[in-house]
Image (spheres, rainbow, N blue to C red):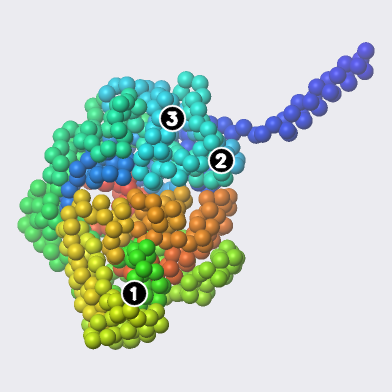
Amino acid sequence: MKQNITSALGAVWLTLILGAVAAPLSAEPKHGIAMYGAPALPPDFVSLPQANPDAPKGGNIIFGESGSFDSLNPFIVKGVPPAGLSALTVETLLGRSYDEAFTLYGLLAESVDTDSDRSYVEFTLREGAKFSDGAPVTPEDVLWSFEKLGTEGSPRYAGAWKKIAKAEQIGSRGVRFTFTAIDRELPLILGLRPILQKAQWQGKDFTASTLEAPIGSGPYVVESFEPGKFIAYKKNPNWWGADLAFNRGQHNLDEVRYEYFGDGGVVFEAFKAGVITSYREANPAKWASSYDFPSIAAGDVVKSEIAHQRPSGIDGFVFNTRKPLFADWRVREALIDAFNFELINQTLNGGVMPRIQSYYSNSELGAAIADPASGKELALLAPFKDQLLPGTLEGYSLPVSDGSEANRANLRKATKLLEDAGWSVQDGSLRDAQGQDFAFEILLQNGADDTIAMASIYVEALKRLGINAKVTTVDSAQYKERTTNYDFDMTQYARSLSLSPGNEQMLYWGSVGVTEPGTRNWAGINSPAAEAMIQTMLTSTDREDFVAAVHALDRVLTAGRYVVPIWYSNVSRLAYVKQLHFPASLPIYGDWLGFQPDLWWYQE
């Protein structure tokens, strides 16, 4: 009898052990999630480290914007929305801490759950989460928002939605998304999707521009606006999330207002006159010479320089390679040679701005572009060797001029490249074998004064090559329409890049954007190598492998000669009224998303 009992107990234990081994390990819901490793903050954190939890509440901030707006739906392709609309009025399941490369903490969701492969993600909504009209945020709102944005919203939402095999409600407050592909960033991407109120959109066309503000759950609501002139956001006194640790010390102002003006020069004059209360200066020469007006001297306006550790990103004049004129890399290289950066930088910036050397320069993610590829970078790019442009593997450097207007050495290089590509000067004009003139348009937005000045200098340099380039300026609505449909030859192009590049890179550089309107691939990049590097970034479980993939992508993009790069700043220059304050502890991203007005407060 005793032997039978022992055998039976042994069988039970064996079954339990085998069951434990065979069953997949189930992760426990967490208060946050990081792209790599664990979140830096514990579950009982008091506030984000860059926030002042004791910041006083009240007061306002007034920004100035050049251009206009004509829609209050920022989630679609059509229309030009006002600044701040989504960030101030709509919330996401998780919130980002900009003091970490890519870590999210619970916001509308109290917890996030995923497995080691990140084959799914499950969010549990907080009890008490409410929209601004008092209605609860429900799993139904979440599921509807994800599907609506993924199928009818801006193309930036479509990629993640296509990777969802199943979306379902779990219990009374949970939502679960199961994925079709390995993409370790997906749980974080979905955590940052805006959550809209399903009931507001019943019977309405989501894809149409509208002047009805979205009903969100965020700290602010739209109080008043006049299209193209101003929009005012008022703090919601019944905001459900005011006491969350994540929000402590954030969203301190009672009002955030944006005034719209015809051009950038008028915005600065409005700041000097006291119409707006904070101004971000992009021009270091102007920062040094033009801030001597009375309110500065009296101490009523304060100047601050905010440092950061984020990548430079890319900024400059982008070639639309969909146009046959710019399809040849030698032509693009020639036009990069013709751009006299040293002269333009001296003329506009006093020569102090560093040039963008690659898309991720100024950070650990930037490749040593001038040096040959080696190690993991070389191994990743080797399968695409025959497709890569010269310089990708061997090393690539931007031209440097002597700073003179003539720029003879670089123009000689440009002339040789153009000849190799089939262009020659005939009767003073650069023409191809069919006698077609080399002529194109640089499309710019009204009010972009510094960019217009830069383009004008560039046009004069191009004349020396026999190239007929002209600058065309349009209002913000026309500019949005034309760039959305890639209806331009060349235009100014700026893309900020983070310390955690991921799915958005496909939207920036993926081949779908060659034909699909509304993506951010304005250059028309069609590179299997770039897409392969992005895929490696998304599936890497090791930080070193991830960085190598970003370095390799950086090489492909930079040597692709898709943009004539200009400069970046490793500091932001802010001037503001003395009543406005920000914490002494700066996030690693500096003056970027999540900084102003989020962390600022007003105090007499």
Label 1: state its secondary structure.
helix
Q: What is the distance, in whole Å, between disc 3 and disc 1 at their CAs? A: 47 Å
Decide: is 588 above or below 335.
Answer: above
List x then y, in percent, for residue 46: 39, 35
Residues 49 and 366: in front is: 366
Which amino acid does the dot numbered 3 rest on? Leu
Residue of label 3: 143
Q: Residues within 10 Å of mark 1 (few under 14, many from 20)?
A: many
Which residue is painted at 46% across and 40% down in the image?
161
Assess whether mark 3 and mark 2 are in contact (beta carbons under 8 angstroms). Answer: no
Which amino acid does the dot numbered 1 rest on? Ile
Residue 348 visible somewhere in the drawing: no
Q: Residue 336: which numbered mark, if any?
A: 1
Earlier sequence position, callout 2 versus callout 1: 2
Earlier sequence position, callout 2 versus callout 3: 3
List x then y, in percent, for residue 465: 27, 82
Q: Residues within 10 Å of mark 2 (few under 14, many from 20)?
A: few
Residue of label 2: 180
Q: What is the distance, in whole Å, between disc 2 and disc 3 at their CAs? A: 17 Å
Label 2: state its secondary structure.
loop
Which residue is painted at 69% across and 31% down in the image?
23
Q: What is the distance, in whole Å, between disc 2 and disc 1 at their CAs? A: 42 Å
Residues 547 and 46: in front is: 547
